[in-house]
Amino acid sequence: MTEQHILRAFDRDLEAIQAQLMKMGGLVETAILEAASALEGRDDDLAEKVRQGDKAIDALEERINEEVARLIALRSPAATDLRMVLSVMKIAGSLERIGDYAKNMAKRTVVLGKMPTIGSAGGSLRRMAKAVVSMLSDALDAHVQRDADLARDVLNRDREVDQMYNALFREFLTHMMEDPRNITPCMHLHFIAKNVERMGDHATTIAEQVIYLVTGVLPDEDRPKSESVTTIGVEGGAA
Amino acid sequence: MDDMRLTERALDAGTTKIMARGVQVFYGDTHALRDVDVDILDRTVTAFIGPSGCGKSTFLRCLNRMNDTIPVCRVEGTITLDGEDIYDRRVDPVQLRAKVGMVFQKPNPFPKSIYDNVAYGPRIHGLTRNKAELDGVVEQSLRRAALWNEVKDRLHAPGTGLSGGQQQRLCIARAIATSPEVLLMDEPCSALDPIATAQVEELIDELRANFSVVIVTHSMQQAARVSQRTAFFHLGNLVEYGETGQIFTTPRDPRTESYISGRIG
Amino acid sequence: MTDASAIRPGIRASLMTPDTRTRRRNAAEARFRLYGRIAIAIGLAALVVLMGSVLANGLGSFRQSFLTLEVHLDEKVLDKSGARDPEAMKKVTTIGYGKIVDAALKATIAAEGIVVEGLTDKDVSDMISKEAAALVRNRVLADPALVGQTVAFKVLANGRIDGYLKGRVTMDSAERDSNVSPRQLELADALVARGILAKSFNAGFITGPDASELRPEAAGMGIAILGSAYMMLVVLFLSLPIGVAASIYLEEFAPKNRFTDLIEVNISNLAAVPSIVFGILGLAIFINFAHLPQSAPVVGGLVLTLMTLPTVIISTRAALRAVPPSIRDAALGIGASKMQAIFHHVLPLAAPGILTGMIIGLAQALGETAPLLLIGMVAFVRDYPGGLFDPATALPVQVYNWTQRADPAFVERASGAIIVLMVFLLAMNMAAIVLRRRFERRW
């Protein structure tokens, strides 16, 4: 926003909301990275910290929703301001979901700690989580800078995350077929992978909100999808 | 970076500037205002809202005894300014009004120069000792009213030649030139266009740093935008008084709810 | 609904063709405009006729016939002692000077070789106004050194001769008139042909005093103008402060109760009281009770003040009420006292209205005749009033006075005085308009 509102208190309110959203984004990014580290390093303490940290994220979402309601009631935003406020609300919802996935990841980490390790899954998941975090942080940066191009870039990067998930899916299938004792940890790891993939989807949702904020239109749904596991089995599985 | 909103809401901790207890106003036989209890805080913008004829302007005019000019008007109850009863027999309303300034609905600059408009108050109250001091007061008041840059080159042009928004800011400058402690505003933006309104609202928000501001407005949105505390009047009663955000998001009284959501007028 | 077709569903009339109702409305409006134009035309016609007749009758009075004579101021007649002592010379009356002037005219006639059959000495001396001798005498007494010299004088011609030059007197009417003979008119023709008798601007009409019935040519309205001016001064200095003070108190300070309502009604009624009543009041109070001198401008001024006050009060109150209350609120709102609010803000804004009311009141007073008749301003006054207590007369009274006189020359004088009166009224009204335009401020 280049121009200021005549009523500067309005600007202060909008900035405050944006700042809280960024704070929430920071907490969520940390949660994802720490959950991935905990998983890879089998660090129960770190996992517990992530689980506790989710409460702060939930509280922050509630605060943002309150602030948004208050701002709509008091300032009756219009045009860009209205889209900004609406997008903040949706983004806060997405961030909260991502936070929940991170918490779920930490929960499963504690369970997995008592089981054998499955190949290099931990490292792969951490790489995947890193990719998601970079998407998320770029999406949030795009929000601050009102940068639709950066947001479109984020949309395209979702494909990489999907491909990583596909690869992991096949790897878990292989491990499970090799040894039935691997089924329990593989199932947990698969849910984690699926959650990370969902985080990526939420990051793209955030990017879509940024495009809506900047241009006023939501992007078309036909972005490239590479999550092909839904078809595995139909064509005869991973033979 | 932590939470600017909280600092603004924490204003409730401010001290009470004006305290009204059991205020009743009668116009002849009409009971215009019943049992109003309000604490107006220092350095806070307090908004009075309500449908036409609800008594909000009447109450505002009680605060600087402008009602005295209406022969049939009678005020009961107590209103104190910093603990002193303003309706005490020893209080001269002229002195009171120097402390409790007023800005009116329609911009009403005197048909004199911009300078004389602002200098009038300090002159009649003898607030300055010489021309240099008076010049200083005029400049400071115009600056505070965010008008200085627009008029500094034509201080001796007639005040009536300004645009509506400028005129209203001139009236505000005139009111603050006497260094009041409280500024009463009776629908100050009802005659202005949206941009001028926004400028005056921004000014009100800045004035909060030095004065206690009380504003009567027909526009709920305006009350929402500029005030920290809001009082809702209905049919001569004070229905609800509280933090503005609370009044506009979760009003406690069903009448307030109906009014701010546009169901009764 | 008389026009059912307009509301019948299904049929939609074209906008291009007006329906009957619209046509009727338009016709009514056109008729009304016509009535308005006719009304204005009638008003204008009345004004044109009035002004036309006054101007046609009265403009002549500003030009008067003068005889230019070389008068030999004979020392033997005017100063027998030869000492040029003004006191001694005053013993020679106007009759003596009249003879000298007559002789000068006779000498001129002889010198120019004018011969008129049956012309008598009396005819010749009657050509000259009786005022001429007094004029010459005053000049000589003011400058005794003139005695013994031959000096050119421009003296007034007799009123009838003046009337002949202006077309009021003809040969036919002269036959029947004992005051003028056809022979004199013949002589006048000859004098006009030689440039001795001619019309020129008559300053004496505006500045000079009134004259007797017999010499309309010398009558002026100087005293009337002066008397009117004195009265206007009295009216201005009394009714402005009294009227404004009363209005401000009634409008801004007085409580609204039955008593003030009563005062208000009475002021309105007072404005409608016939002016003659004020004359009776003035006679009873100022002259019979207070023993002020009759015919004095001070009494006239007092009576006219009484008459003007209601007008001033009503217009001042209207002007005060026209000041928007927001200005009062603004002043009170920053802590001005009521008095400060009124004197700093309300009064300056109301000033144009107050002045306009005052000027209109003055104009009304200037044109008032009836009350002045009752207090003796109708008297014949020859001496200029030196102050407010000296006898004087007033312009409208002078008009009334002149129209009462027999000589038709006075009709011309009366019309001339009306023109002067109207010029004054016009000037005052213009002043009112200019003041209003000048000081009217937007708020």
Image (cartoon, coloured by chain):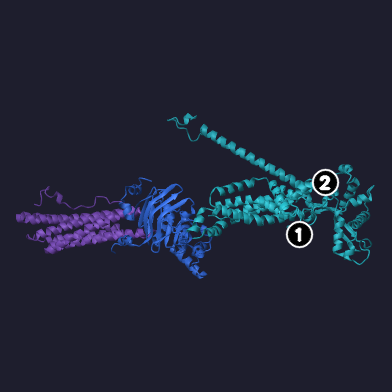
Chain represented in purple:
A
Callout 2 secondary element: loop
- On-image quarter of the N terminus of chain B: bottom left
Q: Position of residue B222 (x, y in %)?
A: 38, 54
Q: Which is closer to the viewer, label 1 or label 2?
A: 1
Count neighbours of disc 2 (C-alpha within 10 A) and say few if under 14, some if 14 to 19, many if 20 or more.
some
Chain designation of label 2: C
Amino acid carrying label 2: it is Asp
Which label belongs to residue C407?
2
Q: Position of residue C145 (x, y in %)?
A: 88, 66
Q: Nearer the viewer, residue B263 or C423?
A: B263
Callout 1 secondary element: loop
On the rendered structure, is C324 left or right of B257? right
Cα distance in 3D space between marks 1 and 2: 30 Å
Quadrant housing residue B3: bottom left
Chain designation of label 1: C
Which label belongs to residue C113?
none
Chain B: colour as depicted = blue
On the rendered structure, is A71 left or right of A113? right
Does label 2 lie on the same chain as label 1?
yes
Q: Is residue A69 visible?
A: yes
Amino acid carrying label 1: it is Gly
Q: Is residue C426 visible?
A: no
Q: Nearer the viewer, residue B68 or C364?
A: B68
Chain C: colour as depicted = cyan
Q: Position of residue C421 (x, y in %)?
A: 72, 51
Which label belongs to residue C386?
1
Whether the residues at callouts 1 and 2 have beta carbons within 8 Å, the answer is: no
Q: Earlier in the sequence, mark 1 or mark 2?
A: 1
Q: Residue furthest front?
A: C289
On the rendered structure, is B69 left or right of A153? right
On the rendered structure, is A181 left or right of B204? left
